[in-house]
Image: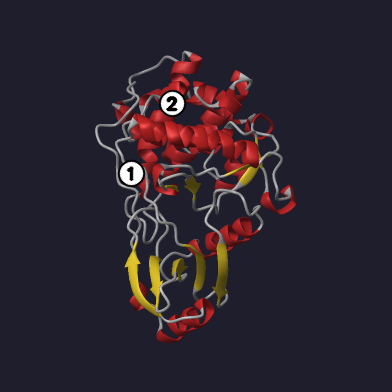
Amino acid sequence: MSDRPAAAPPAAGTRVPYGSLPADLRAEVDARCGAPVVAAESQPGGFSPGVAARLRLTDGRRVFVKAVHPAANAQAPALHRREARVVAAMPADTPVPRLHWTIDRGPDDWIVLAFDDIDGRQPAVPWGPDELDRVMVALDALADRLTPSPIAADWLGEAGDLVRESGRGWADAAAEPATMGRLDAWTRHNIGTLVTLEANVESAARGRTLLHQDLRADNLLLTDDAVLVVDWPHARIGAAWVDLLWFAPSVAMQGGPAPEALLRRFGPAADADPDAVDAVIAAIAGFFTLGSLLPDPPGLPTLRAFQAAQGAIARSWLAQRRGLDGPADEASR
């Protein structure tokens, strides 16, 4: 099994130009900003559909806005609301763009989030060693800053909840002949082991750290002297090393080192129980692999290919760690 597909799919949602927002909503944005918007530059990277734009105001200030309507993607507004709640609760010194305000017109209408506009850029992919070094140091520091979590778990939830919440578990797949028929030969051969490992994910992932749980190059911004982490709608509380397990498949997919090599570089993983790590990798592999079999969600035309590529790498990683044999996995070659 190969660790990496031939080419990484792009991380790109369907962007809506800022100027296409309803005129009364743009007027409300002007009022909340305290000055009219004179220029808007759409930002192409990332999987959220709708508006993602850097705005310039008449007084020279800048603000970054995200906006979505349920007609574009029914799930996206809830994710925007959750992100706003998470970011608003973070300590001021967390390396996350500050949330200024939201406009929420209700479940059947627009929601707009306004953040600091950061004069930065996403890491270059394929990954270069210098930028990856910077990011790894920053993620180490972020895990330390967010332990213990500054947000209570009673509404945020725990990292191991992902299988139950997403419905993308290996046990579910094993019980569905149609799904099993769409999986690669290696996965079908090892489905029993995958189900057993994943069954322990809730206890395996338990911890005290506020986690991002969706780390990728397109969710990072590099400035001259900082690394900032953006897009927090999937945040949960768990073991600090869990975030590296989410991050590693995308790094390998986008030209960086293999996941196991990256894991060895992450300080919070030094004392992690190998069986706990394997349980979480198994769950992540299922999340991506089984998610990739679903229909394309509205406004996110490349998401399923992106998930499939990460799922193949996660399965390969787990096979290497556990010594799992079986038929060659053509999907990860």
User: Where is mark 2, residue-wise?
Assistant: 259
Q: What residue is rendered at 69% in x and 35% in y?
A: 207
Left or right relative to 252: residue 202: right
Toward the viewer: 227 or 245?
227
The x and y percentages for residue 181 are 38, 35
Residue at 60% from the left image edge and 56% from the top image edge: 87
Q: Nearer the viewer, residue 123 or 79?
A: 123
Q: Is residue 7 above or below residue 110?
A: above
- Which disc, if any, is residue 248? none
**Would residue 218 appear left or right of 192 to someone viewing this image?**
left
Q: In what quadrant of the picture does the C terminus appear?
A: top left
Nearer to me, 267 or 234: 267
Q: Which badge, 1 or 2, comes first in the chain's sequence?
A: 2
Residue drawn at the location 60% of the way across and 28% of the way down: 268
Q: Quadrant of the N terminus?
A: top left
Q: Residue at x 62, y 56 (%)?
A: 86
The nearer-to-camera label among 1 and 2 is 2
> SS for tag 1?
helix
Residue 75 percent across, percent down from the top left: 50, 61
Residue type pointed to by label 2: Pro
Q: Label 1, on which residue?
A: 305
Callout 2: helix, strand or loop? helix
